[in-house]
């Protein structure tokens, strides 16, 4: 059974930084991704990274500010978030899928419980 546990969320002022972590009990070969969901909105793609770490993608709204990385020895994916904006507020979810990275939530079968990120203006 795949289990994902996110951590690192919190309340920060605009312009600040946070680093999210997700520990996943998965075998080799899984791509990992971060999504976020603001109140009243659909879950949206943030960033994804391949098993090897050699392929990564991120949403246009976070390019240049957020960086996804992973440590397979620790079975952990990270999301470094810099220059945070109030519109980055939401619940951030970690997800995994077998194979290549995708940006659609429907492509991911396994999800974490989410961690709240709140950015104050």
Image (cartoon, rainbow, N blue to C red):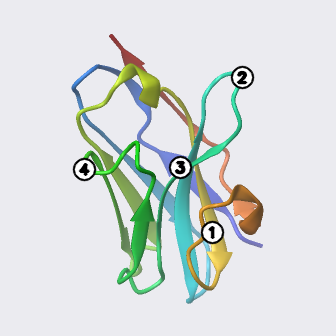
Residue 12, percent from left and from top: 32, 21
Mark sitting on residue 40: 2
Depth order, front residue of 40/26: 40
Which secondary structure, mark 3? strand
Which secondary structure, mark 1? strand
Do residues under tags 3 and 4 come within 8 Å of each other at their CB atoms?
no
The first of marks 4 and 2 along the sequence is 2
Q: Is disc 2 surrounded by few (<14), some (14 to 19) or many (20+) residues within 10 Å?
A: few
The first of marks 1 and 3 along the sequence is 3
Which residue appears at 70% of the width and 57% of the height? 105
Q: Which one is in front in this view, the residue at disc 3 or the one at disc 2?
A: 2
Mark sitting on residue 96: 1
Which residue appears at 23% of the width and 28% of the height? 16
Compared across the picture, whether 95 is left or right of 21 comes to right
List the residue tagged with mark 3: 6
List the residue tagged with mark 4: 64
Do residues under tags 4 and 1 come within 8 Å of each other at their CB atoms?
no
- What is the C-alpha distance between the residues marked 1 and 3? 12 Å
Q: Quadrant of residue 57?
A: bottom left
Which residue appears at 62% of the width and 78% of the height? 26
Q: Quadrant of residue 88?
A: top left
């Amino acid at each position: 059974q795949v289990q994902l546990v996110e951590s690192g969320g919190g309340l920060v002022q605009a312009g600040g930084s946070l680093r999210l972590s997700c520990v996943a009990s998965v075998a080799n070969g899984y791509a990992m991704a971060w999504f976020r969901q603001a109140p009243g909105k659909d879950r949206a793609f943030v960033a994804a990274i391949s098993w090897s770490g050699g392929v990564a993608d991120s949403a246009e709204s976070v390019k240049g500010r957020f960086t996804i990385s992973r440590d397979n020895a620790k079975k952990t994916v990270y999301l470094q978030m810099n220059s945070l904006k109030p519109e980055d507020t939401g619940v951030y979810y970690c997800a995994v899928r077998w194979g290549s990275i995708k940006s659609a939530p429907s492509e991911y079968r396994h999800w974490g419980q989410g961690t709240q990120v709140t950015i104050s203006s």
